Image (cartoon, rainbow, N blue to C red):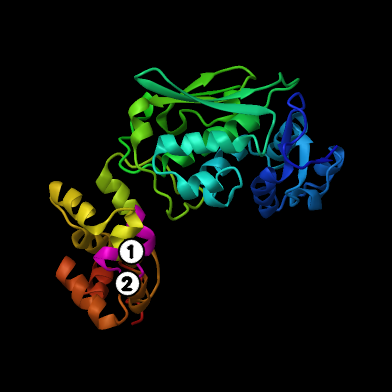
């Protein structure tokens, strides 16, 4: 069933897909404690073959594998969720584009050029009409089955990609996603318009102006379930970028700007235009996180201080008192009756 190929991969008439591309989905299903031995055996595949970057399988085999994995996991939305949370820089199809793209449009173009090294079964196209852009997959053959999970996986990936665009004015009603089977997609997926298509390939249509948006090459990878929709305005995007770094005690303005993907003077100017600053945003986020931990966990005060970037208890208490008007211990006692005083 598998074929070892050196590039170019096979003849143009043979729809092949690099088998290792399915590895993140296999690993997630196994993480859930689901055995896939029988499924792989039925498709004449082995677990070791999944890790080989040199093996290619006919596209229908890949589609059957994806459908079988969703069935084994008893999760109709398996692949769309994994596509949305995938670490893009670690997935072979995206590595080059993630590392080098300067804009969203540049990313799509780089990805389109890369795909033929990994699959002869599909061609990706980026089309524009002056108002809208459409990123579409076109299969070179007609599958004899409905590749629902394959389409859903790419729909999740596109949403994942949008997360990397800086300053996106996210209006989900402006986005139309077309897949071959809507049953593999959650209802009103992130508020976007979902459309039933055919087996020719998934597509997504969005405002053409988004193609010009800067592309964040280095961004903290979101954990599964963390993402609801791309930030609506710049300030929200900045806050989301800073949250994973609140524990860093020496989170300087320069470092914070780098995390957000801007030069410090550029970001300072942008924030000044909306009446705030990086230092103010960092302090506000630390205050919010400290309150969340005080009210929602049993962590001691010192541990909470460390979690929001304070190396000693005294400095955390001083800052918290400046934010709220009382000490962390007093705040917890007042708002969480029955929790206990918490150890210091």
Image quarter of the N terminus: top right
| Point 64% across, 32% down: residue | 150
In the displayed structure, does residue 14 sit left or right of residue 126?
A: right
| Spatial separation of the CA atoms under disc 1 and disc 2 | 18 Å
The numbered mark, 1 or 2, whose residue comes first in the sequence reads 1
| Secondary structure beneath label 1 | helix
Q: For mark 1, what is the residue?
A: 295
Vertical order, 53 against 309 (above or below) = above
Residue 309, which numbered label?
A: 2
| Point 57% across, 17% down: residue | 197
Vertical order, 312 against 93 (above or below) = below
In the displayed structure, does residue 41 sit left or right of residue 93?
A: right
Residue 328: x and y, percent? 25, 73
Image quarter of the C terminus: bottom left
Q: Quadrant of residue 163?
A: top left
Residue 81: x and y, percent? 55, 41
Q: Are marks 1 and 2 in contact (CB under 8 Å)?
A: no
Other-residue count near label 2 (Cα within 10 Å), few / some / many at <14 / 14–19 / ≥20: some
Look at the image and give the residue range highlighted in magenta. Answer: 241-254
| Point 28% across, 69% down: residue | 332
Residue 174: x and y, percent? 36, 24
Q: Is residue 29 magenta?
A: no
Q: Nearer the viewer, residue 85 or 273?
A: 273
Q: Nearer the viewer, residue 47 or 186?
A: 47
| Secondary structure beneath label 2 | loop
Q: Is residue 244 magenta?
A: yes
In the displayed structure, does residue 228 sit left or right of residue 152?
A: left
In the displayed structure, does residue 282 sit left or right of residue 224?
A: left
């Amino acid at each position: 069933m598998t074929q070892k190929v050196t590039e170019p991969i096979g003849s143009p008439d043979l729809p092949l897909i690099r088998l290792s591309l399915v590895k993140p989905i296999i690993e997630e299903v196994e993480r859930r404690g689901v055995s896939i031995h029988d499924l792989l055996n039925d498709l004449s595949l082995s677990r070791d073959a999944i890790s080989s970057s040199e093996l290619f399988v006919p596209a229908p085999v890949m589609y059957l594998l994806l459908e079988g994995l969703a069935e084994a996991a008893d999760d109709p939305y398996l692949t769309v969720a994994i596509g949305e949370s995938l670490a893009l820089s670690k997935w072979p199809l995206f590595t080059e584009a993630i590392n080098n793209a300067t804009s969203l449009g540049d990313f799509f173009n780089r990805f389109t050029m890369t795909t033929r090294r990994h699959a002869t079964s599909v061609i990706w196209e980026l089309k524009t009409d002056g108002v809208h852009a459409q990123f579409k997959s076109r299969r070179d053959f007609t599958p004899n089955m409905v590749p629902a999970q394959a389409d859903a996986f790419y729909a999740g990936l596109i949403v994942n990609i949008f997360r990397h665009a800086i300053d996106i004015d996210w209006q989900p009603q402006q986005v139309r996603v077309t897949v071959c089977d809507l049953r593999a997609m959650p209802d009103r997926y992130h508020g976007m318009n979902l459309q039933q298509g055919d087996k020719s390939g998934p597509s997504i249509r969005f405002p053409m102006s988004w193609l010009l948006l800067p592309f964040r090459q280095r961004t903290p990878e979101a954990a599964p379930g963390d993402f609801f929709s791309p930030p609506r305005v710049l300030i929200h995007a900045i806050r989301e970028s800073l949250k994973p770094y609140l524990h860093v005690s020496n989170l300087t303005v320069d470092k914070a700007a780098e995390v957000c993907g801007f030069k410090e003077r550029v970001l300072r100017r942008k924030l000044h235009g909306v009446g705030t600053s990086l230092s103010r945003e960092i302090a506000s986020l630390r205050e919010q996180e400290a309150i969340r931990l005080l009210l929602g966990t049993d962590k001691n005060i010192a541990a909470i201080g460390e979690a929001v970037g304070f190396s000693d208890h005294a400095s955390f208490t001083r800052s918290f008192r400046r934010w709220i008007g009382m000490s962390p211990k007093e705040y917890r006692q007042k708002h969480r009756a029955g929790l206990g005083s918490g150890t210091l």
